[in-house]
Image (cartoon, helix red, strand yellow):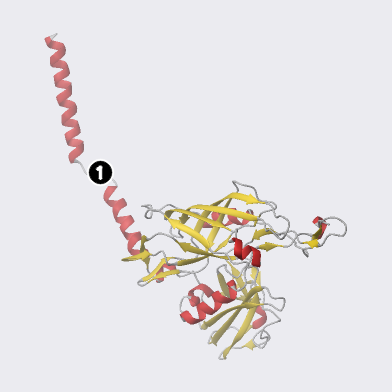
Amino acid sequence: MKKILSFILINTLMCSNILLVKAAEPLKGSVTETNEFKQIQDELFTGKIETLDRKDIINMTVSQVLDSSLSVEGDEFFAEVTDDVYGDKGIIIPKGTFAHGKLTNTTEPGRLGKEATMDLSFDYLITPDGREIPIEGQMTTKLHPVAQGAKIVAQDVGYTVAGGAVGGFMALNWLGLGAAIASQGYTLAGGAAVGGTVGLGMALMRKGNHVLIAPGDEIKVKVNTSIDLPVYKTEALKQEELLYKGLDININDVKHGKDPFGEVNTITLTILISNMSDKTISGLDMALINDYNAKFSPSIFGNTKLMFRQIKPGDKVAGEVSFAVDNINRKFWLIFYDRKKSKILTKISVDNAYRNLPEKTKRKNEKVRTKHKNYKKDDDFMELDF
């Protein structure tokens, strides 16, 4: 018995010594990981903290179609921040931040013009640098009874931000995320809405519409609680550009506008080109591309002088050029092609230029994008109810 107790005691002491030695040794990789994390923090953030207040508004757009006649409760979706959110010390939520949401309730349109409704909930944001910020939020297209009776369509979105940013960074494949989000989108053709009749000899009574929120529709995000967030360095948020030696292209103004059919899908750039390179470039070799690599040629409904201009070595040219795009809220680059080599010669970020514009210009653009916005969906002519 004594031998057994002695054996147990010796083993216990030996294990204790091993544990003490291990405890005295530094954890392998801990210093390196801490330094790498700090380096990332230093590259992205100024070190200052800013509070996102209840009064702040976030502009967003959905990344896929939400249609009360097709979508069902439980459908998940993403929305994307379309404008940088500023605090007094700088940007705290950058353009391109995603919000994850879910459709929680739908109602059908009714007689006497009663519109369909959709209720949405949100649970977290993902910033471009990979931080996940938990939120509790909701949106509804349901109107106040007074507004409903007057047929006034005006809707803000409500977010309730809960808690702080989740610590750490995660490696995100943004091309994969973007492609996944894009693959959920689809387009719907609409026709003219027609009222239905209730019995022979009865007065016409209009049936309400289904509601639809589509990519490009900008929604207002109203923050309901405060949250402390780090302030980004301006340099950290700049989009990548491709420059050609001697060819300087400056975007001095960016205006959002409507096409001749009333759709808010036009981007007009005021640009200054100084060509001290060995290339002759043409306005016909100019285009916009977005972050999904969709290409948009200059619009014939805008100023076409620059479009048909040859810009030779030694030339300096200034002018406006307009582009009709599929979603005005995406990220864009102005590009010039090298026809002989069939490749992009230069690629200038519109978003980088936009951050340097006066606040007055940004407010005008926001007003154009959101003016008279509603989510009414006109029924397809094949689905008319007589």
Relative to the observer, which residue lies in front, 93 or 306? 93
Report which quarter residue 43 is drawn in: bottom left
Residue 303 seen:
yes
Residue at 19% across, 31% down: 18
Percent from the top left, x then y, of residue 89?
Answer: 35, 71
Report which quarter residue 336 is drawn in: bottom right
At mark 1, the secondary structure is loop
Residue at 88% across, 57% down: 200
Percent from the top left, x then y, of residue 169?
Answer: 39, 53
Relative to the observer, which residue lies in front, 26 or 219? 219
Q: Which residue is mark 1?
A: 27
Residue at 55% across, 77% down: 365
Counting other residues with Cα less than 10 Å from the Cα at mark 1, is it few (<14), some (14-19), or many (20 or more)? few
Left or right of residue 69: residue 40? left
**For residue 168, above or below residue 192:** above
**For residue 205, above or below residue 87:** above
Task: Look at the image and tell me in which quarter the N terminus lies.
Answer: top left
Percent from the top left, x then y, of residue 274?
Answer: 53, 87
Q: How many marks?
A: 1
Amino acid bearing label 1: Leu
Percent from the top left, x then y, of residue 101?
Answer: 54, 52
**For residue 155, above or below residue 286:** above
Residue 349 seen:
no
Left or right of residue 99: residue 116? right
Residue at 63% across, 51% down: 106
Relative to the observer, which residue lies in front, 94 or 55? 55
Left or right of residue 20: residue 223? right
